[in-house]
């Protein structure tokens, strides 16, 4: 079993595989070198907070990240008397990563996902469920953006000399 594990590790090393969170992996290339543009609303704040919790916030950043968020709430389960029992919130985030020294755009993309919530409780419970669903959606979109940036980082982010 140990021989099999060593053989697998050697094969991965030979193919040029670098773990994202390992030395010189995509995450380490972006760690504390990224500054997300200042958020203008709650959704932008939540997505910024989630990205910075994974990649840090560079005091002197090399990269700037702009994010445009669009959400839409849709009634999903509607009774015959037109009472909505469930809502879905779809979200789409378009991002652009820039080199702050040159202004060059290094990576762009769009991510989309959705969450839902029940509207069968009291007004307060429904408002809390809606707020929680938005928080979950922004966390999901932030995870998707972070994964794409980490995957692309080796193509544009040389290791920074410390």
Image: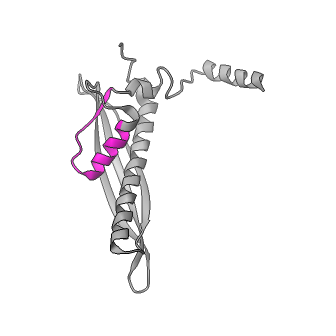
Q: Is residue 152 depicted above or below 66 in this figure?
A: above
Report if residue 42 lies within the magenta region: yes
121 vs 100, left or right, is right
In this rendered view, identify the residue nearer to me: 28 or 121: 121
Q: Residue 12 falls in which quadrant of the image? A: top right
Identify the residue at horizontal 66%, vertical 22% (top origin).
9
Direction top: furthest residue = 161
In this rendered view, identify the residue nearer to me: 101 or 106: 101
Q: Which residues are magenta?
A: 33-52
Q: Residue 14 falls in which quadrant of the image? A: top right
Identify the residue at horizontal 40%, vertical 41% (top origin).
145
Report if residue 77 lies within the magenta region: no
In this rendered view, identify the residue nearer to me: 16 or 24: 24
For the rendered model, the colour scheme is one colour
88 vs 105, left or right, is right
Identify the residue at horizontal 34%, vertical 45% (top origin).
47
Q: Is residue 123 depicted above or below 4 in this figure?
A: below
Residue 161: x and y in percent read: 36, 13
Image quadrant containing the N terminus? top right
Total of numbered circles in the picture?
Answer: 0
Residue 92: x and y in percent read: 36, 52
Q: Is residue 67 depicted above or below 89 in this figure?
A: above
């Amino acid at each position: 079993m140990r021989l099999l594990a060593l053989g697998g590790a050697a094969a991965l090393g030979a193919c040029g595989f670098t773990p994202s969170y390992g030395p010189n992996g995509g995450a380490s290339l972006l760690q504390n070198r990224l500054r997300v543009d200042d958020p203008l609303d709650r959704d932008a704040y939540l997505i910024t907070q989630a990205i910075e919790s994974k990649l840090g916030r560079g005091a002197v950043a090399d990269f700037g990240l702009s994010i445009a968020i669009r959400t839409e709430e849709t009634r999903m389960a509607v009774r015959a008397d037109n009472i909505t029992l469930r809502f879905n919130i779809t979200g789409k985030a378009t991002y652009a990563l820039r080199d702050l020294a040159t202004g060059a755009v290094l990576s762009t993309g769009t991510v989309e996902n959705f969450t839902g919530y029940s509207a069968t409780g009291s007004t307060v419970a429904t408002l809390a469920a809606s707020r929680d669903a938005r928080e979950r959606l922004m966390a999901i979109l932030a995870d998707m953006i972070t994964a794409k940036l980490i995957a692309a980082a080796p193509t544009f982010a040389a290791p920074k000399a410390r």
